[in-house]
Image (tube, rainbow, N blue to C red):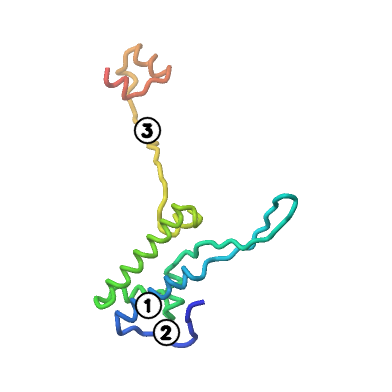
Amino acid sequence: MPKSKAGRPKEYTDKDQLDADCGEYLQWCKDNPILEEKAFHANGLITKATVSHMRAPTIHGLCLHLGIARSTWYLLAKTPQFSDITKKYTDILYERKFTGAAAGMLNPNIIARDLGLKESSSVDHTMKSIDMSKLTDEQVAAIASGASIEAIESE
């Protein structure tokens, strides 16, 4: 795993060092995919093979690699000296997870939740009241057979 150590969190004073360390984490993710041992069956033989899966880069993993708390990362993001670096790597992590999920290399449901993406639809359940005493017999019959109030009002 990356170079996390116990003790006092690291303090960054040089944005080039932060940039280099973040880049090192991304390279580590690429060089250390998740390995899964799978069994395959072919021609009556069962064989095992190791399948590698993309390691999703995360803020959590990045902070572990850097030896800092996530709160420190967010404080660095608010510091003018480091904000461009934190924004750059936050965007890179987002893009890698999004494209990894889109390509089927990462679980799209997990990544969508992590990235704050969601599909949504809404249904308007508001009810409109109508004064039935002002309707004609034909309009009441139309409503009774399923016509919408909007359709009746436009007549």
Q: CA distance from mark 1 to mark 2?
A: 9 Å
> Which callout, 1 or 2, points at the residue further toward the start of the chain?
2
> Which callout, 3 or 2, points at the residue further toward the start of the chain?
2
Which residue is found at the position 51% from the left and 55% from the top? 107
- Amino acid type, callout 3: Met
Which residue carries the number 3 mark? 127
Which residue is outermost to the top?
138
Q: Is residue 79 left or right of residue 38?
A: left
Q: What label sits on residue 72 in the rendered view?
A: 1
From the image, state whether disc 1 or disc 3 is nearer to you: 1
Q: Is residue 52 left or right of residue 70?
A: right
- Amino acid type, callout 2: Pro
Residue 51 image offset from top left, x and y in percent? 59, 61
Residue 91 image offset from top left, x and y in percent? 34, 64
Q: Quadrant of residue 38?
A: bottom right
Disc 1, SS? helix
Other-residue count near label 1 (Cα within 10 Å), few / some / many at <14 / 14–19 / ≥20: some
Q: Which image quadrant: the C terminus?
A: top left
Other-residue count near label 3 (Cα within 10 Å), few / some / many at <14 / 14–19 / ≥20: few
Disc 3, SS? loop
Which residue is found at the position 27% from the left and 20% from the top? 154
Does the CB distance between marks 1 and 2 fall below 8 Å? yes
Task: Determine whether 1 is above or below 48 in the image.
Answer: below
- Amino acid type, callout 1: Thr
> Which callout, 1 or 3, points at the residue further toward the start of the chain?
1
Which residue is outermost to the bottom?
7
Q: What label sits on residue 134 in the rendered view?
A: none
Front in this rendered view, residue 135 or 53: 53
From the image, state whether disc 3 or disc 2 is nearer to you: 2
